[in-house]
Image (cartoon, grey):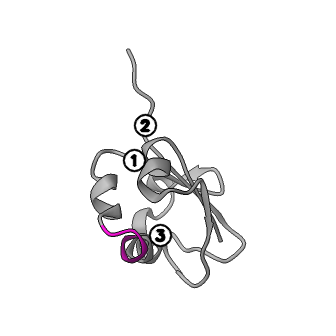
């Protein structure tokens, strides 16, 4: 699957995109990313939004959302302002 990083995650990982194969759920993907980039999950505690094929995982099955190698996962911070 293709994982796209945005904003501060680009700085943290040093990448804009990454191909990863194998994780079956969003939770497994996050575990793999945390192994590859130690402290990755801590970055998510700052309020990042995760989309699978353009759909927010909050409207799917959360961290149990199933993944396949054809999916695109986008991870970015929520928009600020007001």
Q: Quadrant of the C terminus?
A: top left
Q: Horizontal and vertical percent for residue 49?
A: 45, 47
Residue occupying the point 72% across, 72% down: 70
Q: Is residue 36 magenta?
A: yes
Mark 3 element type = helix
Mark 2 element type = loop
Q: Earlier in the sequence, mark 3 or mark 2?
A: 3
Residue occupying the point 27% across, 58% down: 42
User: Is disc 1 in contact with disc 3, using a CB cutoff of under 8 Å?
Assistant: no
Q: Which residue is mark 1?
A: 48
Magenta part, dominant SS:
helix
Q: Residue furthest bottom?
A: 22
Q: Earlier in the sequence, mark 2 or mark 1?
A: 1
Mark 1 element type = loop
Dot 3, crowdedness within 10 Å: few (<14), some or many (≥20)?
A: many
Q: Which residue is mark 2?
A: 78
Residue 78 or residue 59, whichever sits in front = 78
Q: Residue furthest right?
A: 70
Residue 1 or residue 56, whichever sits in front = 1
Q: Horizontal and vertical percent for residue 31?
A: 38, 75
What mark, if any, has residue 15 been given in the picture?
none
Residue occupying the point 64% across, 77% down: 68
Q: Horizontal and vertical percent for residue 71?
A: 67, 67
What is the quadrant of residue 38 in the picture? bottom left
Query: In the image, which residues are magenta?
Result: 34-38
Q: Separation of disc 3 and disc 2 at Cα? A: 18 Å
Q: Quadrant of the N terminus?
A: bottom right
Q: Which residue is mark 3?
A: 26
Q: Is residue 39 left or right of residue 48?
A: left
Q: Separation of disc 1 and disc 3 at Cα? A: 13 Å
Residue occupying the point 44% across, 53% down: 58
User: Is disc 2 in contact with disc 1, using a CB cutoff of under 8 Å?
Assistant: yes
């Amino acid at each position: 699957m293709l994982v796209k990083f945005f904003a501060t995650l680009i700085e943290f990982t040093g990448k804009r995109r990454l191909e990863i194969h194998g994780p079956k759920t969003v939770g497994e993907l996050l575990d793999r990313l945390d192994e590859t980039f130690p402290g990755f999950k801590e970055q998510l505690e700052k309020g990042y939004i995760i989309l699978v094929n353009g759909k927010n995982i909050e409207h799917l099955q959360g961290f149990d959302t199933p993944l396949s190698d054809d999916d695109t996962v986008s991870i970015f911070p929520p928009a600020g302002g007001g």
